[in-house]
Amino acid sequence: MNLPVVVHRARLGADEFRVIRPAEPLTHAALADHDRYLGAYLDRSTARTIAGLWLLAARSPGSLVHLPMRTNRPPVGGSPAGESPAGESPAGVGSRLDLVLLHHSLQFAPSRWKQVRSRLDTGRPRTVRLPEAEQDGGAAIDYAARHYRENRDLFHQHLHAETLFMTGSTKVFRETAHHFLDVADRGPAHVPAHPGHAHYCTSLHANAGILGNAREIHIEYCDRWTA
């Protein structure tokens, strides 16, 4: 996968921050806060882009990977009531958020984000090569090890300035990017093949041993979007 991005920098006093954004707007993407869980609603192209950004976060421990989407229009319809994890229809429920992916070693305080965001420079375009995005499922995952008490490869979340911060390790970002590739690869074929149940989704859920101080993220393919 070749991923076009823009690399921005912002300075706050003596500190400089590197922020990576997708080069093209994530128009068909929405991230909604449903209280008990978070919902990500994506079309095929956007799901692949986010998989690439997920992998980029795994290899960029010194950067904040910012996915602006809080002002996007929502998908049309969304899941029928009762099919989402909380039994809600996601398209019309929950406040919409931006997303920031960051490595735990960066130790970034989300309270500084609003200032950083306001001071970003115009940025420099780059194209990142991500060959791992083309691998089927990536490297073998030791699912049993995720449930060991000493497992520290967990996601933690914070909410600040209309933004969800997903903090994790290189390993947990790399091992969960396939969820977005799965939605991109299987969602488009599923919808026309199941007209009475046109709902394709996956999730980052608590039982998978990847969530620390974090809520489940329901990831759904959506092919129709508000104009």
Image (cartoon, rainbow, N blue to C red):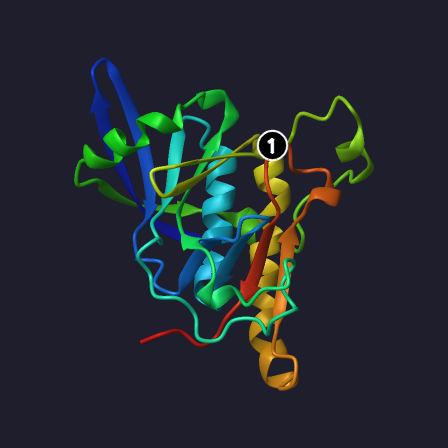
Three-letter residue code for mark 1: Asn
Residue at 42%, 61% in the rendered image: 29
Q: Is residue 138 above or below residue 83?
A: above
**Quarter of the figure with residue 207:** top right
Residue closer to the observer: 153 or 52: 153
Residue 128 visible in the current orientation: yes
Could you tell me which residue is drawn at 22 percent across and 41 percent down?
124
Q: Position of residue 113 (x, y in %)?
A: 32, 31
**Figure check: 124 above or below 44:** above
Which of the two residues, 128 or 163, is positioned nearer the viewer here?
A: 163
| Residue to which mark 1 is pinned | 213
Identify the secondary structure beneath mark 1: loop
Residue 115 spot, x, y in % from top left? 24, 29
Q: Where on the picture, by quarter, is residue 185?
A: bottom right
Residue 27 higher or lower than 212, as above or below:
below
Image quarter where the C terminus lies is bottom left
Q: Quadrant of residue 163?
A: top left
One can see residue 135 in this view: no
Q: Residue at x 46, y 28 (%)?
A: 61
